[in-house]
Amino acid sequence: MEITKQTIMGDMLQYDGGIAYILMQSGMHCVGCPSSIGETLEEACAVHGIDADAVLNDIKEYLASKK
């Protein structure tokens, strides 16, 4: 699965639950919130005032380290 800023949060978390840790470290503590799982990564970051590009980069680094 390719993760982008347009990836739905629920899909991303279902793909790899370890991404939740990265999101929480970035300041998104409502990762399991029913409304957040339907948002894109970009939308969720915007709600929290977080740089979506930085979070996406951290997610990609995490996934690459698992290979």
Image: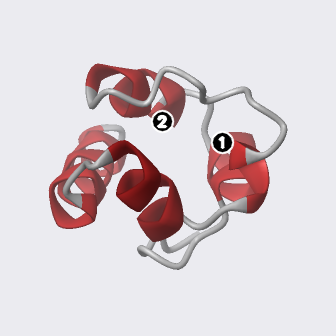
- Name the residue at 84% across, 37% down: 34
- Residue density around tag 2, few if under 14, some if 14–19, many if 20 or more, within 10 Å: many
Q: Position of residue 64 (x, y in %)?
A: 27, 51
Q: Position of residue 29 (x, y in %)?
A: 49, 20
Residue carrying label 2: 19
Q: Residue 24 bears which disc, if any?
A: none
Q: Amino acid at mark 1?
A: Leu
Q: Quadrant of residue 14?
A: top right
* Disc 2 from disc 1: Cα separation: 6 Å
Q: Is residue 34 left or right of residue 8?
A: right
Quarter containing the N terminus: bottom right
Q: Quick one: SS at disc 2?
A: helix
Between 52 and 1, the residue placed more toward the observer is 52
- Name the residue at 43% across, 68% down: 42
Determine contact: label 2, label 1, CB under 8 Å.
yes
- Name the residue at 36% across, 47% down: 63
Q: Residue furthest right?
A: 34
Q: Residue 13 bears which disc, if any?
A: 1
Q: How is the image coloured?
A: secondary structure
Q: Is residue 51 left or right of residue 5?
A: left
Q: Position of residue 11 (x, y in %)?
A: 73, 57
Q: Amino acid at mark 2?
A: Ile
Q: Quick one: SS at disc 1?
A: helix
Q: Earlier in the sequence, mark 2 or mark 1?
A: 1
- Name the residue at 72% across, 26% down: 32
